[in-house]
Image (cartoon, helix red, strand yellow):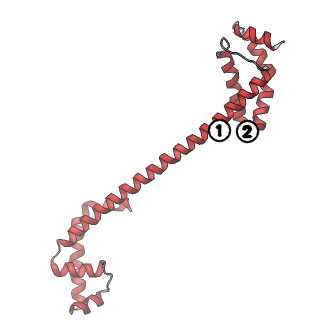
Amino acid sequence: MDENDLLKRLKEDDVEALHLLFNQYFGSLNRYLYLLFKNEAMAENIAQDIFVYIWEQRHKLEIHSSLEAYLYTAGRYRALNQLRNEKLHKHVLQKISQSDTDAFDLNNKIEMAELEKLIEEAVSSLPERCQKIFRMSRYDELSYKAIAGLLGISVNTVENQMSIALKKLRKVLKPFYLQMLFSL
């Protein structure tokens, strides 16, 4: 059947004309799209979409080249658009994922700063001598023996003061243990 007659019948809502068009061109359009993009599912979906579009736009459809050239050009443009949209979609998902990671990092930094402040307040609440020994041990990373030598006290006294400091800190920080475990 002549292409012009086929298009005329389509515009007159002749479903049989669509079937003839589909049977004549679907296979070659599908193969053409597959050869271009090496994606069988995409080729088939786009080829089907083009025939649906032709039916939906049959009253407005103006084809100035051959029907086959129109179908191949439409298929190529649709496939390129789909690939571009998929690339854009991946890029947006990547940006969202990155912003989620950034927000998570920022949230962790805020929580860590709050935790450090809480620990510092707890250490500051210790008696002066106990506080000094704790800071030398934990912040300056000195051994009990070195602390004892610097302060002129026994290692046993350093151990006792550290035990007192750790008990008080555990008591103050106990409500935050779970939060600390999950933020690490």
Alpha carbon separation for disc pair 2 and 1: 9 Å
Q: Which numbered tag is attached to residue 22?
A: none
Q: Are marks 2 and 1 in contact (CB under 8 Å)?
A: yes
Amino acid type, mark 2: Phe
Q: Where does residue 27 sit, x and y in percent of width and height? A: 80, 27
Q: Farthest residue to the top: give it.
A: 12
Image side of residue 175 versus residue 80, left or right = left
Q: Farthest residue to the left: give it.
A: 127
Image side of residue 117 versus residue 33, left or right = left
Q: Nearer the viewer, residue 100 or 182?
A: 100
Image side of residue 77 versus residue 87, left or right = right
Q: Which numbered tag is attached to residue 37?
A: 2
Q: Determine whether the residue tagged by mark 2 lies in a helix, strand or loop.
A: helix
Q: Determine whether the residue tagged by mark 1 lies in a helix, strand or loop.
A: helix
Amino acid type, mark 1: Leu
Q: Where does residue 136 sit, x and y in percent of width and height? A: 27, 82
Q: Nearer the viewer, residue 71 or 169?
A: 71
Q: Farthest residue to the front: give it.
A: 64
Q: Farthest residue to the right: give it.
A: 1
Residue drawn at the location 29% of the way across and 63% of the way down? 115
Q: Does residue 82 lie above or below 171 as drawn? A: above
Q: Does residue 137 lie above or below 96 as drawn? A: below
Image side of residue 108 versus residue 147, left or right = right
